[in-house]
Image: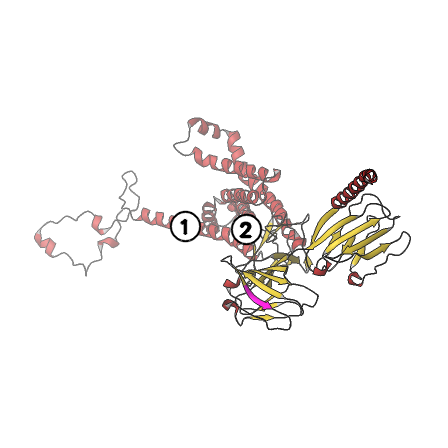
Amino acid sequence: MERQFTLLLPLRLFLHLLLLLRSLDTEAGMKNVFGVVGSSVLLDPEYEADLSNSDIIWEFTASNKSPVTILDYVPNGQKEEPNKHFKSRLHFNASNGSLMLNNFKPSDQGVYTITVDTQVPRRIDLRLTAGKKNVFGVVGSSVLLDPEYEADLSNSDILWLFNGSNKSLVTILDYVPNGQKEEPNKHFKSRLYFNASNGCLMLNNFKPSDQGIYTITVDAQVLRRIDLRLTEPLSEPLIISNSTYVDTTVELICHVPVGKASSIQWRKDDEVITNGQRYELVQNNSKLIISKANKSDCGIYTCTVENPVSEKNNSYSLSLYSLTQMHHCTMGLYIATLITAGIATLIKTISCFVDCINKISHQFLQHVLQALQFAPMLSFISLFAASVCWIWAEGCSRIKVFVLVLSCLLIILTTLPAFSRMTCAPKWLKKILSTKLCRAILGAVTPLGEITVICASGILLAEVMKQADKGCDPAINLQSTIILAVMGPLVLLVASFAVYIVYTKWKKWTTRALPTYPSVNDPDEFHCIELNSAPPLPVKNNLQSRTTATSEEQPSISDHCYQ
């Protein structure tokens, strides 16, 4: 007997070793997967080979229960789902054997085993985890705390817990099937509405102190955690633009004065705007950037902002103007240059034929010509200023720099004759300017310069006007710019003429007011002498002085002239 037991002992040890190795292999194939109630859970056995031509069986083992088959797959045949509990909730992938379980329930917890042909089965332990979601409320409103559980919970023990700012966990509702619910916490007393069928809790008259984490447990299992936070309703957004001109970078900013937006969306003419070549969204979509805006970018832009408790929108009509303020200034100066140069050319032409006009007109024209001598200089300065404004508006180019240099040269050549007559002018400059060649060149500067200025101003004005076609504004009002450009030089020239006339009369009056006496060299010269400056008459004696005629009987001496 002892010998028989001795022979069987190694065999028994060998069998125990095989069982141990099998159990270790089985445990090694086990992995843990967690799911949230109502979600979809993927049960992936992680096979690398293609299982399409293999027999596959999925089994489910709940706690303290025997395994049941939930899916049976045969190659080139139909799969079977014999268990009603999982009916229409399974999605099977034959290539890798994975199983998708939809609408996860607490009763789905357990061990899922997959067997492929004769291979060692693999196990997946699926457990419930408390899902967490965020809920927002407005002060004074009602907030719904929904655990999102589809099964009927009327026959389950339900407990709602609250963890507030003081970090202490308190019970706010305790429900027992076929019994009364209890609300032990005074803070929530008479403000809770409970639905036993799905476990929902309605919190009325929401307060800032109600913020915190609410936890629902069903039959001692944590089902859901809900983070309840206070938020403000959004006000109507404001849309701010930094530019409304073509060929510039336009930025539209959507600003919400009150509340915090969780999402911002832009639309143009009812079409959603996304990041692309024409548009760029930055700062959580609050800023829309349009690079090198053109006519096609005009339209209605709508900014829609929303948060969990409100949604607001506002629209902005973007009209792009082709001419900036600098363009208007440039155009006005070019028009003024044309008018001034035209007047200067007209004056020069009239001065050539002034001898053919009668004497009265000749005297008047002489005054006009002398008063408007600076018109050419004014046209050159105006051309220079217009070129500077154009460069400022659009940047440098060859034609702009050429006109700028030309206007500077005309200004210098026009001012040289006046500078040479000044006492501070160097002698060598006066000597050079007094030569016939220089005098001929300087004499030709004004007429040729005016013709050049007229041509250049007309061409450049046409170039500026081409910019007006790039905008999308249907009514570009240039009337004010043209009126100012025309009236400016005319008023300046008329004012100059008026000042010259007043100065001439004042100078003539001051010359006549000075006393003059007969010249010794010219005894025939006629002079008028005032009474207070006339030489006294000789008096022979007192009798003669008393018989002198009174002032009423004799004419005044100041009315006589002495020759």
- Image point (68%, 64%), residue name: 149
Q: Residues within 10 Å of mark 2 (few under 14, many from 20)?
A: few
Q: Which residue is mark 2?
A: 325
Q: Which mark is residue 139?
A: none
Which of 88 and 494 lies nearest the eye of the viewer? 88
- Residue 554, x across and y down, in percent: 20, 58
Span highlighted in magenta in the image: 171-178
- Residue 560, x across and y down, in percent: 25, 53
Q: Which amino acid type is shown beneath numbered disc 2?
A: Gln
Q: Which amino acid type is shown beneath numbered disc 1?
A: Val
> Which sits earlier in the primary sequence, circle 2 or circle 1?
2
Residue at the farthest top position? 428
Specify the quadrant that holds the N terminus. top right
Which of 275 and 342 lies nearest the eye of the viewer? 275
The magenta stretch spans residue 172? yes
Which of 11 and 366 lies nearest the eye of the viewer? 11
Label 2, label 1: how far apart the Cα atoms are: 33 Å
Residue at the farthest front position? 1
Residue 529, visible in the rendered structure: yes
- Image point (41%, 48%), residue name: 500
Between tags 2 and 1, which lies in front?
A: 2
Q: Do the CB atoms of the residues marked 2 and 1 lie less than 8 Å apart?
A: no
At mark 2, the secondary structure is helix
- Residue 517, x across and y down, in percent: 26, 44
Along the horizontal axis of the image, is 507 left or right of 336? left
Position of residue 65 relative to residue 440, above or below, is below
Q: Which residue is mark 1?
A: 499
Along the horizontal axis of the image, is 83 left or right of 229? right
